Structures are given as structure tokens and as C-alpha cells.
Image (cartoon, rainbow, N blue to C red):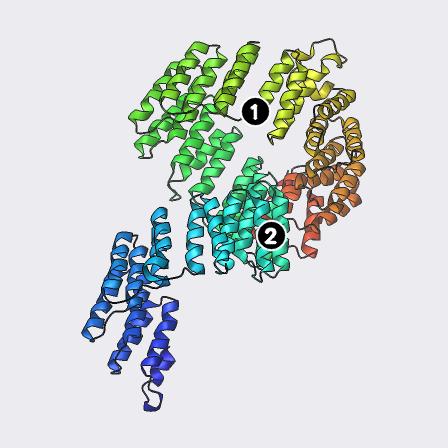
């Protein structure tokens, strides 16, 4: 631009009005307002008369920014120049008002266009329709869409349809969006990539993932290339559904189609893996990001810190904090909130409080989530008095407690038997401007039922109902537990009938409670009826559900003197016979819910935790004979059990099988195996195992944290740690500065012991 203006000083290179307009239009595309003003001023000083196109370009640029005042100054210039505003002028003002969220003013301009002798065009309609949609005035937008043809004989274009489809999807009106999509095609208006992407995103948010995948294929068949936003919508949908491996397949397809993943793509996958407790896979994605020169954001690190905390890996969470800083990012209140919550979940409340106390000097504002996590931690540590002190401090600091804060305190008071104080706190909530939630009542009801105070519990139940809170599955489940504990089967069945009447669907816990209730009553056929209903409702039984079933099946099969009903649920896997497991499979088949991968995985997990490797191996063979492939979690249980039983060759064999089947074993398994082999004196096999894992795409830092620092150094294998570190360096596997510092510090400390 500077060059052109400098050349303009010479007569042979003088710019005309067309050249100036072209330059202004190019700058307008990037909303380079200051540069546009310079060009406009240069134009005037060069005695070139601006035309309507010049003024419209300036007005449009300001309107894109919502700067109506400056835009109006150029409208005055149009009139001063003896020109008349045209459709493009008014259309820009519609856009400007909409950008300022002033849709009513945009509507006035829209209505003025015919009065000024101009004709509204499709862009005029699109700008106003988009403004109405953004303001949540969807029905008005739809009416305007219908009026397009009647008022101005104006045909909607692909942008009109896409704006409306996008808005309808955002309001969960996806059936209407699909109808509009069909109408669009019927009228010969071809959807573009954005239209398809908006619909794919809408379908994914509805978890209609198969339909979304079909739509992407249709899109490709129509010659349109899905972009990174399209793929991200699919990946996010699969991750939120827990189908992260399918999301990873989409990721691979995306790359094979030369569509480069962005930071959001990686963040969605990282979130997905953390959600299903596969944080080692999420960490490997961080490694891939850095390899591809993509800069992780604070969101990336916060997701990983949260994932490590949820898996109980607090040490790795703190290491990520340092890695975050090394990458030029500052931990925020969400990062520290996650750490405080993670420490509290592990009962490490003093450490959590130390972090909390340091936040002010770090310039981090303590938010309601951090206070609530800490208050909850002290309540669970049976230090309710200190939790109440924190609650008081929170209010004094100007941080308003929310319903969740009150709920954790109410729960803490109830657990300490301070029912009166809990009731009083519930009563104080509305006075403090906080409306009690269904959970507030649920906590009280559960505690009252534990004390067999049924009449008092029902009073709270009806109070809650009168306050407009419809009882949820958790509250009904509390009543079920209480009635089963009191052996009141009839009353429990009445609760189930009430749930059906109120259309409250049982969840995993409710089904498990019902199964246990019928099992206690000796009605195993009814328990298996419930199991069948559970499968039909799409709920996978948990490890605990299977433990309950096996406990009741074992009544006639346990070779012990005590009654099965008196066996602690934690002891079931110590005493269960293999034949009882086969009986469970037969019963499940008989009731139309044959065992699946999850069934075998749950049973193997229970056996392996008790070191019953022989039975777990038989279970694995039985599973494969049934044509069911073992899951990654099942192999992990087998590997860990082999290591604890010092059967390292068997553990290594299972790990090799996992790798050949495309699984990425968790680093904990490798840690157990490598450290076990060194303990056993099998140094060469330990080194060979370490070589395997270096080719698997793990995050190098996490390999060093888990195997070298938490594994070898903690066991005093200083030389072995140095040896494996040398291997990493020779293979050019780069570690972060902070990981090197931790290793050197650990090596030095262990050497000096």
C-alpha cells in the first residue's frame, strides 16, 4: 500500500478512482480501518472525487466493527457530495446495528430502504435474519425468511439457509433444521461446506453420530471437501459419547485427506481420552502436537492436569504445571482449582490448603469452584468446623457461595450427624439469594433414610415437590436402598412403580440397588429380570453390579461356613469359585443378556485384584472361545496381575499381544514390568522392554516421570535409571528442561542416600 501511495506522487503513476476503490476494498476485507482512512485522506488530497462505491466501502468497514457513529459520518459525506445512499449503504447499516446487538434499529433501516426508493436484496435480508438469530428471535427470523419472496421477490441463497439452519441447530430445533435443509435442495439451492458442517455439528450434539457420518460421506460424494471444522464436529461428538477410538479413526481419515488438524482437534481428543481415563493416550497427543509445531493452549494443559488428577497421578499433574510454564503459559484459577480438587479427593487437604493460601500472592483470584473444592475436602476429612470457617472467610472475601457450596456443607454436616445445622443451612440458602437444588434436598433425604426416619424424609420429599423440584433418579434410589435395607420389598416395588409413573428412568446405580434387593430376598430370577431390563435400557453393568450378582449366586456355591449374604462385597473375589462365574454366564444367556466384553473385563478385574491369575487366565480363554475379543482394560489387568505375581515373561507376552492388536498399554504396566525385571535381575529383558515402549509414541516426559522417576529412582535403581536415560538420549528423544531437572535432582538425592 505504501509503495502505491509513494508511486502516486509521480504523474505517470497517478491513481484514479477505480484504483483507490480497489485498494480500499482489499483493506476492507481485513478490516484495516486506520490504513483505509489514510487511503481515503490521500484520495481527497489528490483531488480524486470519491464515488458511492468509495463511501460504501468505508461505511461497510466501520459497520463490520459495529461503529455506527463513524459510519454515519461517511453517510453525511455522501449527501455533501451530492450523491444518494443506495441499497448497499443501507445494507451495511443493517449489519452495523446487528453487530451492536441493536436489532430494532436494524429493523428500522430495513423498513426505510423501499421508502428511499431502493430495493432490498438478499444481503439486506441475510444481515437482518442473522441479527435476529443472534438475538434469539428465531421465529421473527423465520417469518422474515418467508416474506423474502412476497415483499421483494428476493430468493434466499445458500447463506440465508445456512444462517437459519445454524441457528435452529443451536436452539436444539434440529428437526426443523433438517426440514429446511431438504427444502433448500428441493429449490435448487446447493448446500456448501458450511451448511453441511453446521448440520453435522447439530447431529453430533444430538449424538446422532451415524447420521452425521453419512452426511459427511454425502458431502464428499457431492464434490465438497470436509474442512477442519467438519471433522472437529465429528471428533467432538464421538469423544463426548465415549467412542474415542472411533474419533481417532476420524482423525486418521482427516490426515489422509490432507486436512491438517488444529489445536482444537487435539484438545477434543485429549478431553475424550481423559474422560475415559486413558490419560497416557492424551499425553501422547500432547507429544504429537509439539512434534508438529502446534502450540498447546492453557485449555490443553488444564485438560491434562484434570486427567492426571482424576487418575490419582497428582505428581504428574504438578509436573504438567511446570511444563505449562515452560511452554510460556501461566496456570490460571482453573488449573489451580483442579489441583486443589485432586488433592482433596486423595485426602491431602493440608497440601490443598497450602496451594489455596499461595494463590493471592500469585495474583490468582480464588473463585467459587476453588473454595467449594476445599470446603468439600475438609468436610470429607471430617473437619466440618474448619470447612465452616472457610465458608465464612469466602463470604467475607466477597466470593458468593453457590448451590454446590451449600450442598457440600450440608452433606458434611449430615455425615457428622449434625442434622439440625444442615436443616438451618438449607433454610438460609434462599435468604442468601441461592435457590436450593434437587441435590440439596437429596442429601437431606438420604441421611434421614439412613437413620430410618421415613416420615421425616417424606416431609422433605413433599417440600421439595412443592418448591417445583421434580424428584430425580438419585432420590428414588435413596428410598430403594432404605427399603431394601429394612427388607421392605413391597414398599421398594411401590417406589419402582412410582418411578415408572413419573417417567423417571433408572440409572446404573438404581438397577444395581434393585438387583441387590431381590438377591437379598432370595429372588434371583427377579434380579436377572432387572439385569435384562438394564441391558435393554442401554446401561452396562459395572464391576460392582457383577460383584453383587456373584455374591448372591454364590449362596449355594461358596465352600465356606458363613452365609453368602453376610460376606463383605469386597471379599467376593477372594472366595468366588470359577464354576460360579460359568453359572453367571449361563444365567445371563438364559435371560437374554449374554455376557459381553464388559462382563469379562469386570470379572477379570475382580480376580486380578486378588491375584487370582489362574482363574483370570481361564476366563480369558473362555472369552476367546466364545468369539469375544479381550479389551485393552482386560489385558492391562492381566499384565499387572502377572507382574505382582512375578510372572514377568507372561506379562511381557500380554504386552506384546496388546501392541499387535493396536492397543497402547498404560505406562503403569510398563513401570511394573521394567522395575520387576530389574528386581528379578533380568537386566537385559528390562532394557529390551524399555526399547519397545520408546517406539510406541508415548509422551517422552511422561515416560521419564512414570518409569524413571516414579519407578526406578523410587526403588533406588540409580544406575539403571541413568542407563535408560542414556538410551532415550541416544534415540534423540527430547525431554523438557523441567523433566531433566527433576531427573538430575532425583539421581543426586538417591546417590547421596
Instruction: Confirm whether residue 548 shows in the render.
Output: no
Answer with the quarter of the image where residue 121 lies: bottom left
Other residues around mark 2 within 10 Å, as few (<14) / some (14–19) / many (≥20):
some
Mark-to-mark CA distance, 1 and 2: 38 Å
In the image, 146: left or right of 616?
A: left
Instruction: Report x, y in % for residue 132.
Output: 34, 51
Q: Quadrant of the C terminus?
A: top right
Circle 1 or circle 2, nearest the eye: 1
Q: Element under label 1? A: helix
Answer with the quarter of the image where residue 277 lies: top right
Front position in the image: 441 or 708: 441
Other residues around mark 1 within 10 Å, as few (<14) / some (14–19) / many (≥20):
some
Image height of 718 relative to 603, above or below: below
Answer with the quarter of the image where residue 58 lies: bottom left
Q: Residue tagged by mark 2?
A: 287
Front position in the image: 462 or 420: 462
Image height of 374 relative to 210, above or below: above
Q: How many marks?
A: 2
Q: Residue tagged by mark 1?
A: 509
Instruction: Confirm whether residue 356 shows in the render.
Output: yes
Instruction: Report x, y in % for residue 548.
Output: 65, 20
Residue 597 marker:
none
Image height of 243 relative to 96, above or below: above
Q: Residue at x 54, y 25 (%)?
A: 506
In the image, 165: left or right of 651?
A: left
Instruction: Report x, y in % for residue 679.
Output: 75, 36
Instruction: Report x, y in % for residue 663.
Output: 70, 44
Front position in the image: 351 or 366: 366
Amino acid at each position: 500500500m505504501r509503495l502505491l501511495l509513494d508511486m502516486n506522487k509521480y504523474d505517470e503513476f497517478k491513481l484514479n478512482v477505480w484504483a483507490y476503490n480497489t485498494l480500499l476494498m482489499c483493506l476492507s476485507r481485513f478490516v484495516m480501518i486506520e490504513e483505509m482512512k489514510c487511503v481515503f485522506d490521500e484520495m481527497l488530497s489528490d483531488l480524486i472525487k470519491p464515488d458511492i462505491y468509495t463511501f460504501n466501502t468505508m461505511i461497510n468497514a466501520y459497520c463490520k466493527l459495529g461503529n455506527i457513529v463513524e459510519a454515519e459520518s461517511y453517510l453525511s459525506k455522501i449527501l455533501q457530495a451530492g450523491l444518494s445512499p443506495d441499497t448497499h449503504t443501507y445494507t451495511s447499516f443493517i449489519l452495523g446495528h446487528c453487530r451492536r446487538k441493536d436489532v430494532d434499529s436494524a429493523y428500522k433501516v430495513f423498513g426505510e430502504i423501499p421508502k428511499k426508493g431502493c430495493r432490498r436484496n438478499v444481503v439486506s435480508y441475510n444481515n437482518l435474519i442473522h441479527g435476529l438469530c443472534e438475538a434469539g428471535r428465531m421465529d421473527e427470523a423465520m417469518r422474515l425468511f418467508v416474506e423474502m419472496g412476497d415483499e421483494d421477490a428476493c430468493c434466499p441463497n445458500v447463506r440465508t439457509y445456512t444462517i437459519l439452519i445454524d441457528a435452529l441447530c443451536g436452539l436444539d430445533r434440529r428437526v426443523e433444521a433438517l426440514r429446511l435443509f431438504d427444502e433448500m435442495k428441493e429449490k435448487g439451492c446447493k448446500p456448501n461446506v458450511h451448511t453441511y458442517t453446521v448440520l453435522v455439528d447439530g447431529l453430533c450434539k444430538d449424538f446422532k453420530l451415524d447420521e452425521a457420518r453419512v452426511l459427511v460421506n454425502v458431502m464428499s460424494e457431492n464434490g465438497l471437501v470436509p474442512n477442519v471444522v467438519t471433522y472437529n464436529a465429528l471428533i467432538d461428538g464421538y469423544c463426548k459419547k465415549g467412542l474415542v477410538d472411533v474419533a481417532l479413526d476420524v482423525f486418521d481419515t482427516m490426515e489422509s485427506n490432507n486436512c491438517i488438524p488444529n489445536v482444537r482437534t487435539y484438545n477434543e481428543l485429549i478431553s475424550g481420552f481423559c474422560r475415559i481415563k486413558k490419560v497416557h493416550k492424551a499425553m501422547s497427543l500432547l507429544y504429537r502436537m509439539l512434534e508438529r509445531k502446534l502450540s498447546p493452549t492453557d485449555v490443553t494443559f488444564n485438560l491434562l492436569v484434570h486427567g492426571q488428577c482424576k487418575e490419582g497421578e497428582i505428581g504428574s499433574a504438578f509436573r504438567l504445571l511446570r511444563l505449562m510454564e515452560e511452554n510460556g503459559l501461566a496456570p490460571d484459577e482453573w488449573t489451580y482449582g483442579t489441583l486443589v480438587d485432586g488433592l482433596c479427593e486423595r485426602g491431602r487437604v493440608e497440601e490443598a490448603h497450602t496451594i489455596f493460601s499461595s494463590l493471592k500472592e500469585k495474583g490468582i483470584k480464588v473463585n467459587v469452584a476453588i473454595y467449594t473444592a476445599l470446603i468439600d475436602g475438609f468436610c470429607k476429612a471430617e473437619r466440618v468446623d474448619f470447612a465452616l470457617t472457610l465458608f465464612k472467610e469466602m463470604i467475607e472475601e466477597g466470593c458468593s457461595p453457590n448451590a454446590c457450596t451449600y450442598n457440600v456443607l450440608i452433606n458434611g454436616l449430615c455425615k457428622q450427624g449434625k442434622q439440625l445445622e444442615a436443616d438451618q443451612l438449607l433454610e438460609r440458602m434462599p435468604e442468601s439469594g441461592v435457590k436450593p437444588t434437587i441435590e440439596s434436598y437429596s442429601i437431606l433425604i438420604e441421611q434421614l433414610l439412613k437413620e430410618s426416619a421415613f416420615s421425616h424424609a417424606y416431609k422433605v420429599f413433599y417440600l421439595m415437590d412443592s418448591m417445583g423440584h421434580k424428584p430425580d433418579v438419585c432420590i428414588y434410589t435413596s428410598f430403594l436402598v432404605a427399603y431394601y435395607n429394612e427388607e421392605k420389598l413391597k414398599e421398594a416395588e411401590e417406589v419402582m412403580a412410582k418411578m415408572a409413573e413419573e417417567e423417571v428412568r433408572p440409572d446404573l446405580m438404581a438397577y444395581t440397588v434393585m438387583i441387590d434387593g431381590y438377591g437379598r430376598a432370595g429372588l434371583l430370577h427377579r434380579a436377572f429380570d432387572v439385569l435384562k431390563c438394564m441391558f435393554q435400557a442401554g446401561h452396562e453393568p459395572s464391576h460392582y453390579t457383577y460383584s453383587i450378582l456373584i455374591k448372591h449366586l454364590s449362596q449355594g456355591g461358596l465352600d465356606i461356613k458363613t452365609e453368602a449374604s453376610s460376606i463383605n462385597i469386597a471379599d467376593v473375589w477372594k472366595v468366588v469359585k470359577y464354576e460360579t462365574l460359568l453359572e453367571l454366564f449361563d444365567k445371563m444367556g438364559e435371560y437374554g443378556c449374554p455376557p459381553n466384553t464388559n462382563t469379562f473385563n469386570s470379572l477379570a478385574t475382580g480376580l486380578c485384584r486378588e491375584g487370582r491369575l489362574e482363574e483370570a487366565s481361564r476366563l480369558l480363554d473362555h472369552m476367546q472361545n466364545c468369539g469375544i475379543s479381550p479389551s485393552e482394560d482386560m489385558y492391562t489387568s492381566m499384565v499387572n496381575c502377572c507382574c505382582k505375581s512375578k510372572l514377568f515373561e507372561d506379562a511381557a507376552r500380554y504386552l506384546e499381544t496388546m501392541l499387535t492388536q493396536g492397543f497402547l498399554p498404560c505406562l503403569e504396566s510398563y513401570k511394573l514390568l521394567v522395575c520387576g525385571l530389574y528386581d528379578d535381575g533380568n537386566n537385559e529383558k528390562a532394557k529390551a522392554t524399555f526399547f519397545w515402549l520408546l517406539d510406541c509414541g508415548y509422551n517422552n516426559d511422561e515416560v521419564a516421570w512414570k518409569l524413571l522417576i516414579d519407578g526406578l529412582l523410587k526403588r533406588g535403581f540409580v544406575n539403571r535409571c541413568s542407563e535408560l536415560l542414556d538410551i532415550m538420549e541416544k534415540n534423540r528423544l527430547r525431554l523438557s528442561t523441567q523433566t531433566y531437572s527433576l531427573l538430575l535432582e532425583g539421581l543426586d538425592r538417591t546417590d547421596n542416600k
